[in-house]
Amino acid sequence: MPTQLFIPGGVNQVRMFLILFCLTLALQLIRNFGDQFNFFKTSPAKIYGDSPAVLGLFRIPRISSGSFILAGVVLFLSLLAAALGVIPRVSVAVALVCYFFYFSPIISISYVNRKTNLIPIALMILLFSPSIARPLSEPTPEWPLVLIKICIVQMYLSAGIQKLRRCGLKWTDGTFLRDYFLNHYLWGDMSAAMRLAQNLTLCRVLSILVLAFELTFWIILFVPALAYVYVVSGILFHLGTWFTMRINYMKYLMPVYTVFIADVACRWLVNR
């Protein structure tokens, strides 16, 4: 666990994370806008129903194609402005609002549904961070970064606990993962999934590794030196699910993952 939670120390990692997070997310918006706009034009709400209410309380109204484009453009520009230090707090607030208007209508896309949940949380934490408008070389408290890491830990820990609640330790025998591979082979013709499903021993090893990874990710909060081991493992894990099951978490998890390189990137930039 970082020691400088409330007492300024080191460099301004929080602003560095803001820059990395916003630029990475803005890049994903550019890369995927065409696909997402085409999906929006199919009126997915008529098939999948309205998107869930925000916090279970606030329903995002249906918007037109023009409003969807506007929300995407304003979201992109606000992220860019925040990264460049142009009224960053206002820019982050605008990005937070636009997130819901842009992503809510397309939440039924497989790589959006549940995959973007950490984005508004990260924006909310940055919004209330006292450090986002300060120079990179200025020592600042690190509690916003710790909160974001806790959110990532919670995501993995809840996934591991859910596996135990559903399957118990039987998850580790490999049969459940094998069934997942077979299901995705039948559903998406994923030949890699079929090859893995044919090797029960390998499925057993992968099941144990995945469960251990998810249930112990919290260690990075107390042993920061292990963060890179877990981050690399996490990237390999998500790449594996993409190539074998077409479950793509990294597209919108990568911006949040930049929290783990904020310190190195900030010190390098300040020294340069």
Image (spheres, grey):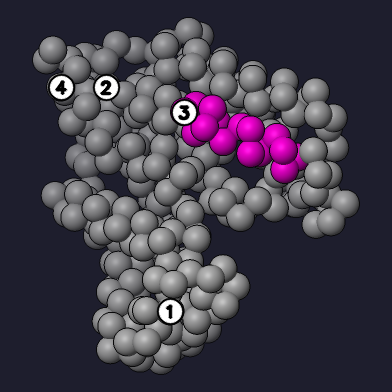
> Do the residues bearing badges 1 and 2 touch, measured as CB atoms within 8 Å?
no
The CA distance from mark 1 to mark 2 is 47 Å
Q: What is the C-alpha distance between the residues marked 3 and 2?
A: 23 Å
- Give the quadrant of the C terminus: top left
Classify 10 Å Cα crowding around label 3: few (below 14), some (14-19), many (20 and above): some
Please report the bounds of the magenta region as a residue range: 26-40
Disc 3 designates what residue?
A: 27
Upstream in sequence: badge 1 or badge 4: 1
Residue 122 position within the rendered picture, expressed as x and y whole percent measured from the top left: 48, 37
Q: Mark 1 or mark 3: which is in front?
A: 1
Tag in front: 1 or 4: 1
The residue pinned by badge 1 equals: 194
* Chain-order first, disc 4 or disc 3: 3
Camera-side mark, 1 or 2: 1
Q: Residue at x 51, y 21 (%)?
A: 79
Q: Which residue is mark 2?
A: 12
Q: CA distance from mark 1 to mark 4?
A: 44 Å
